[in-house]
Amino acid sequence: MEKKLASRLLHLLSIASPTFHESAIADDFQKTVHDQFPDAQCKRHEDSLIIQFPGDTTLPHIVFVGHSDTVPPFFKPFTQDGKIFGSGASDMKAALACYLTLFETALKKLTDHYRISCIIYAREEGTTLEQNGLSGLLKTYPDFFKSIDLAIIGEPTNNHIQLGCVGSIHAEIDFIGKACHSARPWDGKNALYEAIPFLQEISKLEPVKHTLFGVDFYDVMSVTSTKNDSGRTTIPGKWTANVNFRFAPVYSLEEAVTYFKNTLHSLGASPENIRIMDQVPAGSVIETPLFKQVISQLNQPVEAKQAWTDVAQLTRLGIPAFNFGPGLTSQAHRPDEYVVLSDMVKHCSLLESLTKRKS
């Protein structure tokens, strides 16, 4: 098992697949399915795939879900001290390698108890919902998604089970001054200095905890980037901050936007200078008997997902879903990203436990 996992992951890591450039890895997955699982049906939309294995359609339908795109610049993968290094190793090619190895070794036992499918989709990282590959599959194959009873998303979770996910809204806020030469600052007004009261107030905000389904989510607001319209010898006449609001699944998206705008205004931002740039909903928790059964069988620590994942898209459609992957959350998006091979072995073993379905 260990050698199979290592070999498969190193192969996947050797195929560069930055966001918007996933064609080669999608082709590779299609070829693997054709060669190793000739009875499977493979549907493709752009660079995203749905793989359906033959089985009893009256059984509960479990789908393993993962994205193929990566964030760090590509580097040649290698192994060292029980770790496998490569762009996307933890986020989340390790999970994809585990899925293919699981299907190779335990598909027959799984399909004795469940209808099994796999989704491998493009353009998850840093994209809008309109660009997201899973969103494209949802629109192209709606009947398939109506058949899903449970989705397991292989985002990096340290082999813990992470429920739901926080939503995310980005807003740009302009602070207005008057541009002038930096040698004569009295001729203008520094827009950055105009923002200082706001920055001081937002820096004092504490996380707001919401306990749902026995796990803790946190609302947090942070200034994440800035820009201004001048050079190094000019007093900026406008300074812009990007503020990111991560919110628990206690708000609808509309409620979260309203709360965010009101909070920014209360901290000193002018309403006319606040622009919502991007928004995605939080992911809820849909508890069903199958959802509870699978979590019980996996028997791993359960916590909240304090990040956004495509659990949000699925639960919005009424599909029960949770995050569960072998990758390390601390390694996601790192330039020297790695995954621990023993964590992958453990992950496969845990997924194989589903072959012993509880009645």
Image: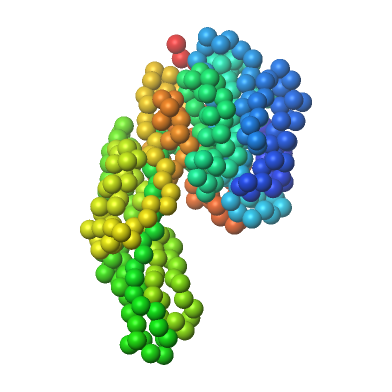
Question: Residue placed at 52% from the left, 35% from the top?
Answer: 135
- The part of the image, by quadrant, that contains residue 198 is bottom left
Question: Residue placed at 71% from the left, 27% from the top?
Answer: 33
> For the view shown, which residue lies furthest in the right direction?
35
Front residue of 139/356: it is 139
The quadrant the N terminus occupies is top right
Q: Where is residue 123 in the image (x, y as percent from the top left)?
A: 58, 43
Query: How many marks on residues?
Result: 0
Q: Where is residue 172 in the image (x, y as percent from the top left)?
A: 39, 58
Residue 47 appears in view: yes
Front residue of 335/320: it is 320
Question: Residue placed at 32% from the left, 46% from the top?
Answer: 257
Q: Where 27 falls versus 267 (above or below)?
A: above
Residue 352 appears in view: no
> For the view shown, which residue lies furthest in the left direction?
266
The quadrant the C terminus occupies is top left
Front residue of 227/352: it is 227
Question: Residue placed at 46% from the left, 14% from the top?
Answer: 358
Q: Where is residue 250 in the image (x, y as percent from the top left)?
A: 29, 38
Q: Where is residue 6 in the image (x, y as percent from the top left)?
A: 68, 40
